Image: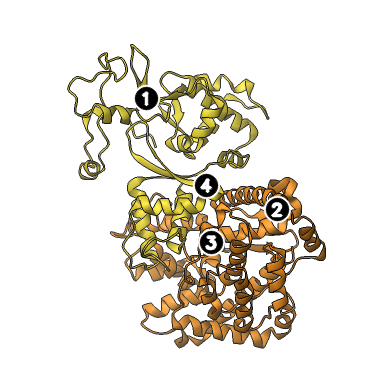
Chain colours: A yellow, B orange
Amino acid sequence: MQCGPRRMSVMTDVHRRFLQLLMTHGVLEEQDVKRLQKHCYKVHDCSAPVEKLEDFINNINSVLESLYIEVKKGVTEDDGRPIYALVNLATTSVSKMASDFAENELDLFRKALELIVDSESGFASSTNILNLVDQLKGKKMKKKEAEQVLQKFVQSKWLTEKDGEFTLHSRAILEMEQHIYETYRDSVKTCSICHSLLIQGQSCETCGIRMHLPCVAKYFRSSSEPRCPHCSDYWPHEIPEVFNPDKERESSTSKPNKTSSRSRQH
Amino acid sequence: PVESHYPPSCLQSLTIAIMSPPSKRRRYSLEQGRHPPPSEHQSHEEDAQVLMAEEEEVSASSTSSSCFPLSSRSSSPSCSLLPSTPESVSATGSSFTSQSTQISYSPSQAIATSVSGNSDEGSISQGEESQSILQASPDYEAMLREALDVKVADVVQFLLLKYQKKELTTRAEILTIIREYQDHFSVIFRETAECMQLVFGIDMKEVDPTSHSYVLVNTLGLTYDGMLSGDYGVPKTGILVLILSIIFLEGNCVPEENIWKALSTMGVYAGRKHSVYGDLQKLITNDWVQEGYLEYWAVPNSHPTRYEFRWGPRAHAETNKMKVLEFWAKICDSDPRAYPFWYEEALRDLAERAQSSIATETTTAMY
């Protein structure tokens, strides 16, 4: 079993177990991914030093490339935590959601997704989603049933709920980014800092550009007078704090006040 | 362990790696055999093979006519060869012949493989072989190869979903996915199976030859690491193996009371939180049953209802009686052979598994 120097991509039992466990969890935060990696080394009695996570994952991805699968890294939109998931890159009919849900349930998700992408806040209210129940394809669904389906989406980490409103779970953003860009080309929003898909974020009231909350946090990290990078107007919103994994581990009980109003959404 | 029938697919992927036009998929290489077997395993394997040979001589000779070799552990080093020229394929093929114990692999089939340039190991029907010669023009081959690559990727993704949901899959379902390439089912199936094994460590085992249904099992041993139930406490796999051991040692079926009695010696009681392990009752009677490691059966006509534990399907798939006996022997600071009654049962279990994996390989080769 090779755990030593990297030549070309080599799949060992360490990598295989890692993939299996990552798949089973769906989406994992970076610190859990690191734990998982160490666990896989330990289980296979590998005495080699644990490879740097980035290299470890790049190795795996070069093997997965021809299968149109990837271990993708993303960042949660609300508090900037790095996360990883195993995603399909090919938009074929075989998708994780399609196999778990019925036709009318998938259509409910599509309707919710459209409302979320179109919304200003990135959230769609339960009421607005449920009002579309009559327009669903497939078997007729009552509102009561639709409420339960929405909960199913939350449990399987496709949506998250906050105060009766729904937005995309970070896993869904990782998995569906390409699909969303293609389907909602006109209404989709992007972040002016990282240029990737934006569902939740802050926007400049003067010129309208948008930024992810973690992107805002990083960009305005040490400025006393935050100004819009595009139009230089004062940035009107509260600047969130940058996610710091070390700080998280130390202060497990107290949260920084600026982010205390936001709940952990995954 | 015998059920990780790794080496035959080694040869296939080597063949594919050499013969097909540059394809993105073939970037993975094989490491030097999987787990270098410790010497105790070697002798168990031999014991099992002897048992198998004695009891199943007839079926062994009939399977030798199939062209699908089941190599013994000693041939796994051949997989570490990465020949860069086509000529080496037949060299590898013949090294298989010399090392495989009970099944013969004829050199002509190895040559047929290198000539036809597809991944069939000689079990190609006349029709397929002539078809592949007719359609040997480079453009067609390249296009077909590309299309098949995409289909294999589709099937792999489908199977990964099935694996996560712990569902069986059927040949019919796979055929639905490959659609217009159904004629190439055997190639796609074989490459998919290899991919699943080499990249993800997941095996496709045929459960029912009549309905062609398959179960996807992990070849790496118990995957449970306590993270699934959101439980970030002390890994409880040791307790699971302990329970599996008790079940095996008490005749494969044990009343619930016996499990709790055994655990009480470790200070673990039902309904009471242990300082290290927490509350195990839910884990044992519910979580591990759901995961498929244990089966929890109500004893019929018992008042009040009593329950029994057996191994669940996932335990059978991920480990075996010999491994569990070794675990137990280690705890008791002794050797599996010190328990002759259970040692024999564990050997029989290994032999049965070897037998069924030959059957799987044979039927797979016939597609």
> Quadrant of residue B184 in the image?
bottom right
B305 versus B151 height, above or below: below
Numbered disc 3: secondary structure? helix
Amino acid identity at mark 3: Leu
2 or 1: mark nearer the eye: 2
| Residue at left offset 45%, top offset 63% | A12
Q: Which residue bears the numbered disc 3?
A: B198
Name the mark on residue A69.
Answer: 4
According to the image, label 1 marks what residue? Answer: A192
Mark seen at residue B138: 2
Q: Position of residue B235 (x, y in %)?
A: 36, 60
> What is the distance, in whole Å, between disc 3 and disc 2 at their CAs?
28 Å
Q: Is residue B54 above or below residue A229?
A: below
In this view of the protein, which residue sits in the foreground, A53 or B302?
Answer: A53
Q: Amino acid at mark 4?
A: Ile
Label 2's element?
helix
- Is there a contact, CB below 8 Å, between mark 4 and mark 3? no
Disc with the residue nearer the chain's start (4 vs 1):
4
For disc 1, the chain is A
Task: Give how far apart the Cα atoms at labels 1 and 3 are.
Answer: 41 Å
Marks 1 & 3 on one chain: no
Please state which amino acid type lies under the numbered disc 1. Answer: Ser
Residue B212 image offset from top left, x and y in percent:
72, 59
Q: Is residue A45 left or right of residue B133?
A: left
Quarter that holds the N terminus of chain A = bottom left
Instruction: Classify residue A119 as left or right of residue B345.
Output: left
Three-letter residue code for mark 2:
Pro
Q: CA distance from mark 4 to mark 3?
A: 15 Å
* Circle on res. B336: none
Q: CA distance from mark 4 to mark 1?
A: 27 Å
As measured in the structure, the alpha-carbon distance from the residue carrying label 2 to the one carrying label 1 is 47 Å
